[in-house]
Image (cartoon, grey):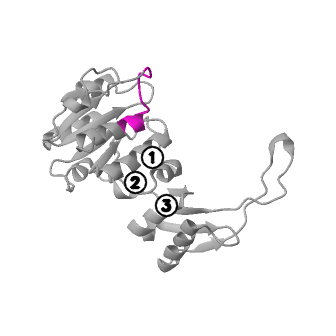
Amino acid sequence: MPVVLRNPHSVLAVLKQRPSDVLEVKLPAGKPSPAWGEVAELAKLAGVPVRTQLGLVKPMKGGKSDLGRQSVTEATIKEKQPLGVEELLALEGTDPHGVWLALDCLQDPHNVGAIFRTAGFFGVRGIIVTKDRSAPLSGIAYDVAAGGLEVVPHAQPSNLARAIETAKQNGIWVLGTSEHESRPVSQIARDRPWMVVVGNEEHGLRRLTLDSCDDRCGIPALGPVPSLNVSVATGVLLAALTGKL
């Protein structure tokens, strides 16, 4: 299914990683911004159609119309195809132990995109995204990821519990996370491969998921706010487990 991107940095990442999957680039009349100008140049080199046009008149609040036209700046791409779970777990990385992520029913595509971006920063080997009851990998997720979805491979199994069991069979330890856990992430051993599982924005990890984990941890609050947004928490967890914190 085609995906529409409006962040030039996410488009640049696709052009660099899989240029044949960029279907079209649309730019407004006139000189584009430096980032979109780079998109146009790379797209032309890859043989991608680059169209210049104006958007349609959009109605304003109160029923009045905007007499100007809205510029169209976007690219249409093919969605990135997921890997199988076994294939994802077999990928090598620069870290001798490795860290993977599993997202248990996250609902907000902004959070999913932010996690992919953070994962790309910390060198996560792969992400498992639950296929059902999860936010789709939409244009919002791609744009927020700012290229993270292109550099971090992912799998979308229908059964997370089975994927976790497969990880264990491949020698990967599974770490459940929760704001209710008193054991801090700083006490988790770094000398082993980990799959870090983060949960739904409102309900956290499902009980079945939590029970299947080898270990559990949380992030202790130092102030009166008791919890973190899931994407921010994921960044803290990855910084700790990769030795960057």
Residue position for label 2: 148
Query: Residue sitting at 85 percent across and 57 percent down?
Result: 67
User: Viewer-proximal residue, 118 or 24?
Assistant: 118
Secondary structure beneath disc 2? helix
Indicate the quadrant where residue 179 lies. top left
Residue furthest front in the image: 223
Q: Please say whether residue 225 is one of the residues in the magenta stretch.
A: yes
Q: Amino acid at mark 3?
A: His
Q: Nearer the viewer, mark 3 or mark 1?
A: 3
Query: Sequence order check: which comes first, mark 2 or mark 1?
Result: 1
| Residue 205 pos. (x, y %) | 34, 27
Residue 113: give its label: 1
Query: Residue sitting at 29 percent across and 28 percent down?
Result: 209
Residue position for label 3: 9
Left or right of 56: which side holds 222? left
Residue 159 visible in the displayed image: no
